Amino acid sequence: MPSILENVRQWRSYDWSSRGSEWCEGYGGVENAWQHAVLPRIRSFVPTGHVLELGPGYGVWTDYLCPQPARAKAARKAGGDALSRQMTLVDLAPNCIKFCRKRFGRKGMLYYANDGRSLRMIDDESIDFVFSFNSLVHADLAVMREYLLQLGRKLKPGAFGFIHHSNLGEYSEEFGHMDPAYEHWRGRDMTGERFREACREAGLVCIVQELLPWGSERFIDAHSLFVRPNPGQRFEERIIHNPDYFEQARAGDHTAEAWYRRTP
Ligand SMILES: C[S@@+](CC[C@H](N)C(=O)[O-])C[C@H]1O[C@@H](n2cnc3c(N)ncnc32)[C@H](O)[C@@H]1O
């Protein structure tokens, strides 16, 4: 829970007029979320050849990562340092894919509405970086395992991925007496530990996992960075609990406010 069917219903009928900015309020807005939460965590991996984004919604992050500088307004502002050469978007909501196709056009872009679990449209060993933010938090363990199993083949050897996912399952003992509003519709059986196990099953290594609080002091979310190692490469797993995650992003904003380029 939430199931794929529930996700399809939710995101097909959702009012997308805010285009994803509603999930960035805790960061101090979209630009701040990108500059101080997302980009610092993926800076070593973009720009690159081919980026796969899972669950782009209406393209709030695609706008920073997609190949067209003319459309990647905010990426240009940041010096255009996050533009990939090719990008593939996969989302289970056809309305999202339709909107993104119109928004980002055809040049360097491929779009697929999928069944919420299959990546069969992607060639093996064709992806340099896979990215998902604010989306697969709503996926359960079975979906996550299936995506990771496929990513073990779709990523090029030596390539990395970053996925924002649920850790709500770690609080399963509180289910029943936890206010459902605190669950934020996260995958109930998903945990950081299960994500790391699923990586191992897929031949991937989760090299950093940051557990973070979302909407309460509970660490119900995680950001996981993983790699498909080249033969013979050894990576350690590192786990971080970050209770100050949102404060750090907002503090970044205050620094940025003081140092931006002014016109008199
Ligand atoms: C909360 S929205 C976030 C969208 C976007 N990442 C953002 O931050 O604005 C969740 C998105 O993930 C998509 N999604 C949910 N489960 C998915 C799955 N199993 N496979 C692909 N897309 C999924 C939904 O259709 C929706 O577009």
Image: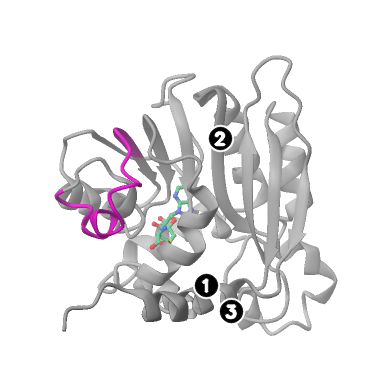
Task: State the residue lying farthest toward the right.
Answer: 173
Could you give the CA–CA distance between mark 3 and mark 2, rounded to whole angstroms? 27 Å
Q: Does the residue at mark 3 contact the one at mark 1 (Cβ under 8 Å)?
A: yes
**Residue position marked by numbered label 1 in the rendering:** 249
* Residue 262 spot, x, y in % from top left: 23, 78
* First in sequence: mark 1 vs mark 2: 2
Ligand 1 within 8 Å of the CB at mark 1: no
Q: Quick check: 177 left or right of 81?
A: right
Residue 247, numbered circle: 3
Please rate how many residues cluster around mark 3, counting C-alpha atoms within 10 Å: few if below 14, some from 14 to 19, many from 20.
few
The residue positioned 68% from the left and 68% from the top of the image is: 220
Instruction: Inspect this view and state whether residue 241 appears.
Output: yes
Q: Quick check: 99 left or right of 195?
A: left
Mark nearest the camera among 3 and 2 is: 3
Residue 160, numbered circle: 2
Could you give the CA–CA distance between mark 1 and mark 2, rounded to whole angstroms? 23 Å
Pick the quarter of the image with the N terminus: bottom right
* Residue 156 spot, x, y in % from top left: 51, 22
